[in-house]
Image: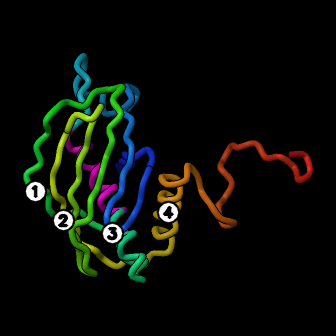
């Protein structure tokens, strides 16, 4: 199973900063088992959301340097501590700050807040590896478009399955 936890990227200014939002919903599947009667969003998924954002920042930094073939893979989490519980109905504001970026990897400081209260503040180290599969490259571009713009952009964007179409001239 692959989780996509960021709901929206609100800022992407490589190499310095990225910001995003994760809205935690009671309908998230994880609450079936974590924990019945006391729903708490798992810390591992808080980390995953922060890693998604940190990876996006590093990949965008490398794209600006002409390396659009690199994929960020989380390799080290430094002393992560959760300072408050994350519950259904919470909106987590996520932030990644670039610390270093080279062609083989990089580091980011990541923070999560709820209502301006700190959830966690840690540093993540990523390896950057070449990505050559054109299907995976296209899927990652589509996901980034959705995160940044709320939907796919450009003439190559396929129609959304099940969406109503309006004939030309009938708009």
Picture colour scheme: rainbow
User: Which residue corresponds to mark 3?
Assistant: 15
Mark 2 in CB contact with mark 1 (< 8 angstroms) = yes
Q: Which mark is residue 70?
A: none
Disc 3 residue crowd, few under 14, some 14–19, many 20+, Cα 10 Å: some
Q: Describe residue 63's horizontal placement relative to residue 114 as left or right.
A: right
User: Which residue corresponds to mark 4?
Assistant: 139
Q: Which residues are magenta?
A: 43-56
Q: Nearer the viewer, mark 4 or mark 1?
A: 1
Was residue 50 drawn as part of the magenta stretch in this picture? Answer: yes
Q: Nearer the viewer, mark 2 or mark 4?
A: 2
* Precedes in sequence: disc 4 or disc 1: 1
Q: Describe residue 168's horizontal placement relative to residue 105 as left or right.
A: right
Q: Quadrant of residue 130?
A: bottom left
Q: CA distance from mark 3 to mark 4?
A: 23 Å
Q: Which mark is residue 78?
A: 1
Query: Please, is residue 170 above or below residue 17 in the view?
Result: above
Per the image, label 3 sits on a secondary structure element best described as loop
The quadrant in which the C terminus is found is top right
Q: Quadrant of residue 123?
A: bottom left
Q: CA distance from mark 2 to mark 4?
A: 24 Å
* Precedes in sequence: disc 2 or disc 1: 1
* Precedes in sequence: disc 3 or disc 1: 3
Query: Please, is residue 57 above or below residue 116 in the view?
Result: below
User: Which residue corresponds to mark 2?
Assistant: 125
């Amino acid at each position: 199973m692959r989780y996509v936890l960021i709901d929206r990227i609100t800022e992407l200014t490589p190499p310095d900063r990225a910001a995003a939002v994760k809205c935690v919903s009671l309908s998230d599947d994880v609450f079936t088992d974590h924990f019945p009667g006391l729903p708490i969003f798992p810390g591992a998924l808080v980390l995953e959301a922060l890693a998604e954002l940190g990876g996006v920042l590093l990949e965008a930094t490398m794209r600006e340097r002409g390396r659009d073939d690199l994929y960020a893979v989380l390799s080290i989490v430094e002393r992560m501590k959760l300072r408050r519980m994350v519950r259904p109905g919470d909106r987590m504001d996520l932030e990644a700050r670039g610390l270093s970026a080279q062609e083989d990897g990089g580091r980011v400081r990541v923070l999560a807040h709820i209502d301006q209260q700190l959830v966690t503040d840690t540093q993540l180290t990523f390896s950057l590896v070449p990505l050559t599969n054109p299907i995976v490259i296209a899927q990652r571009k589509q996901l980034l478009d959705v995160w940044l713009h709320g939907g796919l952009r450009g003439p190559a964007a396929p129609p959304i399955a099940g969406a109503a179409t309006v004939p030309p001239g009938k708009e």
